[in-house]
Image: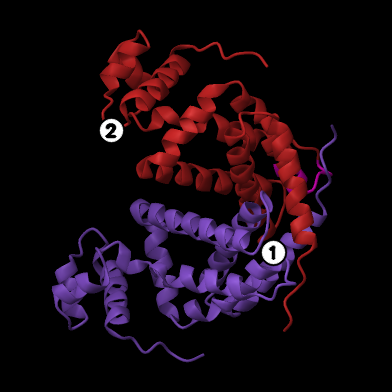
Chain colours: A red, B purple
Amino acid sequence: MGRWQPDARGRLALAAVDLYSERGYDATAVAQIAERAGLTERTFFRHYPGKREVLFAGSELQNRLVTNVRDAQLCTGPMDAVARALEATGSFFEELGPMARARQELIDANPELHERELTKLAALAAALADALRARGVGDPAADLTAEAGVAVFKVAFNRWVHTDNATTLTQTLRETFAALRHITADHAPSPR
Amino acid sequence: MGRWQPDARGRLALAAVDLYSERGYDATAVAQIAERAGLTERTFFRHYPGKREVLFAGSELQNRLVTNVRDAQLCTGPMDAVARALEATGSFFEELGPMARARQELIDANPELHERELTKLAALAAALADALRARGVGDPAADLTAEAGVAVFKVAFNRWVHTDNATTLTQTLRETFAALRHITADHAPSPR
């Protein structure tokens, strides 16, 4: 697994995670993050709107996922398209290495960051549903596949990040999609 | 379907939805909500910590769901337990009648309320996962079943509230759980 070679954007994210972990999120100022990264405050604001956003991948992850769903082969079913798209982003997080865990601990410990993460995931589900509809998937299948896919992602990511990356995120995603299949297959329709 | 007979708590919620719809969420003060409900501001704050919380059912829905999962028969599988628990809360929302839709339109239009809703749903998933673990369900099945159940709930609720309640929420939940089963059954494991 190749280590992340950070550019300015990446160096700022790394510095932010370090400082938030050392001093706390609230006690850290943008100027300190820029200084730690060896950059100016102006450069920080060219890359991120504020100290909260520095922890989130912005639109990059979402764009990649939407492209993957859009480009999936025509014969691919909706859940397969979403599963493959999510699995293909595993390396995106794996490249972050130990920073991924430090980042998640910060998010879990801070309600404001946690809210932001939930909003990001909801936006991701909405974008995936739109990409499925663009493939001709109807409703509620499009929304449902997207929401279920994001549910799998949340659970898999949480497992991966808290088990010291013993398996790859991609593999954890595969296992969690398989687990969803087993769990729902066991589910019987409710009696009327 | 019996119409909702509001107590003080319910009258405040109804007044809030009315005023937020008429004047906007930001332009409405707690004092105005209390006045519209024929109650005092002090009574408002006995029931709700603020103007945001008046739109959310508080811990009532979550407690009901957790109790339902806890009390499900021992032989019931995890997804069945969650599906039945969620279906059993359908009447909770159905009793709100047209207010349910007005409330949802407010939430969808206001980022702050939308964030709050996502936080509530995440807490609901965590509580359901705990209830499943208390039944002896392992991980990741507990988290996954809870997250997938809440994903179904989100999609079903959204459908129900935007289709003028043509079918009951309970029935919409059943159909959406069945749709998840079909979607995941079609999903093939990814090639290694």
Q: Amino acid at mark 1?
A: Met
Residue farthest along the top direction in this orientation: A38
Answer whether residue A78 is magenta in the image. Answer: yes
Asked if residue B153 is positioned above or below residue A176 in the image, the reply reads below
Tell me which residue sits at (44%, 17%) in the image: A9
Quadrant assignment, res B165: bottom right
Disc 2 chain ID: A
Q: Where's the C terminus of chain B, which quadrant? A: top right
Answer whether residue A80 is magenta in the image. Answer: yes
Where does residue B65 sit, x and y in percent of width and height?
53, 71
Is label 2 in a helix, a strand or a loop?
A: loop
* Residue A58 visible to the viewer: no
Quadrant assignment, res B11: bottom left
Tell me which residue sits at (39%, 61%) in the image: B107
Where does residue A3 sit, x and y in percent of width and height?
60, 13
The residue nearer to you, when weighing A133 against B63, is B63
Image: magenta residue range: A74-82
Left or right of residue A26, residue B175 in this image? right
Label 2: few (<14), some (14–19) or many (≥20) C-alpha neighbours in 10 Å: few
Q: Which residue is mark 1?
A: B79
Tell me which residue sits at (58%, 58%) in the image: B129
Q: Amino acid at mark 2?
A: Asp
Using the image, tell me which numbered label, if any, was put on residue A26. 2
Disc 1 chain ID: B
Q: CA distance from mark 2 to mark 1?
A: 40 Å
